Amino acid sequence: MNKYVSTRNSRIEVSASKAVLLGQAEDGGLFVPADLASFKRDYHEITSLDFKGMAKYIWDMFFDDYGSDVIDELVERSYTGKFSSDLITPLAKVGDSYVLELYHGPTSAFKDVALQALPNLLTKARDMNGETDEIMILTATSGDTGSAAMSGFSNVPGTSIVVFYPDGGTSETQRLQMVTDTGSNTTACAIRGNFDDAQAGVKKIFREIPKPSKGVSLSSANSINIGRLVPQIVYYFSAYRQLLDMRSISDGDKVDFIVPTGNFGDIMAGYLARCIGLPIRRLVCASNKNDVLTEFINTGHYDRKRDFYKTTSPSMDILVSSNLERLLYYICGEEHTVSYMKQLEEAGEYQITADELAEIKSVFTGLCANDGEGAEVIKKIFDAEHYLMDTHTSIAWSCMEKYVQDDVPKVVLSTASPYKFCASVLSALGLEVSDSDRKKMEACRKHTGAPIPAGLAGIFDKRIKHTDIIDSSDMKDYVIGKAKR
Ligand SMILES: *Cc1c(COP(=O)(O)O)cnc(C)c1O
């Protein structure tokens, strides 16, 4: 059986299902497989399968205490009928490169791949570990995570979810995706305040009332849960298989992936795919103007004491990338990881050693692009290739253009439908539509001919179900009230 350990104390050992259930280790560390080397496989065993087959293989490997039959059932439940493409994550050839479209799930963002899976992994983990409490998920969101988490947990027995978002702090589309959700166990509630107020409120509730009512325990759908990370490994293998099917590579050829990065979850999954044995040459960590990771990968110096910029790729506006701690654990070891995390907390910065930096640089390249460069890419690629990408994908594309030009195939991960960020996409195309999101979507469709995803097309006509607006100081009482129902 696999052992999962805390990145800050390898004597804290738990099973896979327990790691999923706990989300985070009690010492603040993240759970990682203790023996990553034992996950090495002949990649053909995985690339010979279809997406769900690959998911079954990889989940079964990492979540080994669930048992293969259970895993098969959980994969089916997570992905059957949920994605608008049979391939789940289809690969498109764009110019001389490739775009891996991760946004064909119910909320049109790549977080669906993991958040359709997590509720199933979590409820099973609860049963396996003899817990009987209902799981109540609490999340603060500035947009994408909220709707993807609501969709994932919607009507999952034995769970409920409350999402707090800043009133006026999300796009109209993002807000509508949340407030029109019809799940019988889902709630979206606006907070008078900004995202940080919502986030601080949620953290406080976790500290003060981990059991808000008898028979109800709080949990988080946070991206540091290993149950969110592992499902993301699958699409790297799927991309490789599709390159083979398109005859764009020969078996065994190495490939580069360019990953638009925020919390370092997506690209960490790519690192794990590489460790398992997928022929990946390099992983390019693409950042926007919040370039803390670019500096880190180039100099080994992580410094969160810097200005925070709001950009047109908001899901990458992050100064502390939590999942980086997992990479540190594998590269720098436990002792240094503990020390670096302590320095980050106390001084806001740390510097890794030259040897550690060299090892990171042997796999990762760090690059960044600003809003203007991203917008230029959207227009240029649309004009030249008639391919429309969103503002996060275009940051990655721009980084790819700054990166080595050689004939190793380059796959850009596309993390959101352009229709989720319509206003910025239209303005990049040189079309200013100062109107409602509905009109913007329609203008975007007219101009580009790209189809509006089904999940987004209907939201303007759906009934608004969630109308609560509260002060952040009332969040705790609100949660207790929901838990008592
Ligand atoms: C969450 C998100 C990202 C960043 O992914 P990480 O795993 O946090 O690095 C990038 N793009 C979009 C659209 C996202 O929603």
Image (cartoon, rainbow, N blue to C red):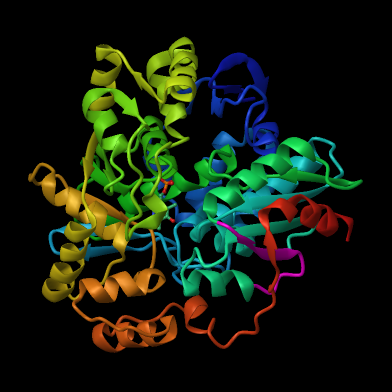
Q: Residue 358, can we see it?
A: yes
Where residue 390 appears, x then y in whole percent?
A: 31, 65
Q: Residue at x 41, y 40 (%)?
A: 264
Where residue 395 appears, x then y in whole percent?
A: 25, 55
Where residue 99 appears, x then y in whole percent?
A: 27, 59
- In the figure, is residue 295 to the left or right of 36? left
- In the figure, is residue 315 to the left or right of 166? left
The C terminus sits in image quarter: bottom right
Give, as a single range, the part of the protein colored magenta. 181-193
Image quarter of residue 397: bottom left
Taking 261 as reference, is 12 above or below it?
A: above
Closer to us: 34 or 389: 389
Q: Residue at x 38, y 47 (%)?
A: 237
Taking 210 as reference, is 333 above or below it?
A: above
Where residue 206 appears, x then y in whole percent?
A: 72, 40
Closer to us: 280 or 161: 161
